[in-house]
Amino acid sequence: MASKVATKPKKSSKKAPAKKPAPQKWESRAVTRLIEAGSMTECEHCGERVKFRARHRDMQVICNVYTKGVWTRVEHYHEECYIKADEPFGPPED
Ligand SMILES: [Zn+2]
């Protein structure tokens, strides 16, 4: 007497979902922006006010600083100072 083993065709649902967690890399980055009227920030490099001057279209560099993937702070630089500081957060984007 042979025992009959029912071999039911199993519906294979073993396909792993192709859901890849997007590796979100939050890195410090810098952008160049016009200094706006009423700007009250200080330059991280020289410590002076990043001042708006009428008729000068001065640029500043704004950096979003991330530490270990977590946003920490914003730093402002005179465009010139950022370059003097050796672009600590990489080349600024527009
Ligand atoms: Zn400066």
Image (cartoon, rainbow, N blue to C red):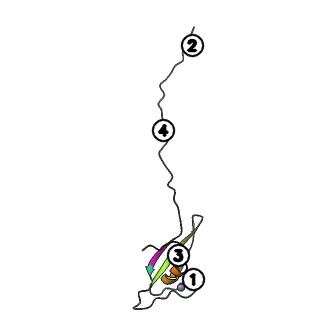
Distance (Cα) linking label 2 and label 4 = 32 Å
Distance (Cα) linking label 1 and label 2 = 84 Å
Give the residues drawn in magenta, as a range. Answer: 10-32
Mark 2 — residue? 3
> Quadrant of the rendered structure where residue 71 is?
bottom right
Mark 1 — residue? 45
Q: Which mark is residue 15?
A: 4
Q: Amino acid at mark 1?
A: His
Distance (Cα) linking label 1 and label 3 = 11 Å
Q: Amino acid at mark 3?
A: Glu
Distance (Cα) linking label 3 and label 4 = 47 Å
Tell me residue 80's x, y (percent): 49, 83
Q: Earlier in the sequence, mark 1 or mark 2?
A: 2
Label the magenta part by its dominant secondary structure. loop
Q: Amino acid at mark 4?
A: Lys
Q: Is label 3 in a helix, a strand or a loop?
A: loop
The residue positioned farthest toward the top in the image shown: 1
Mark 3 — residue? 87
Label 2, residues with CA under 10 Å away: few <14, some 14-19, many ≥20: few
Q: Earlier in the sequence, mark 1 or mark 4?
A: 4
Q: Amino acid at mark 2?
A: Ser
Distance (Cα) linking label 1 and label 4 = 54 Å
Identify the residue at horizontal 54%, vertical 77% (top origin).
Answer: 86
Q: Is residue 12 above or below residue 16?
A: above
Q: Earlier in the sequence, mark 1 or mark 3?
A: 1
Quadrant in which the N terminus appears: top right
Respond yes or no on whether mark 1 lies under 8 Å from ligand 1.
yes
Respond yes or no on whether mark 2 lies under 8 Å from ligand 1.
no
Q: Is residue 38 above or below residue 72?
A: below
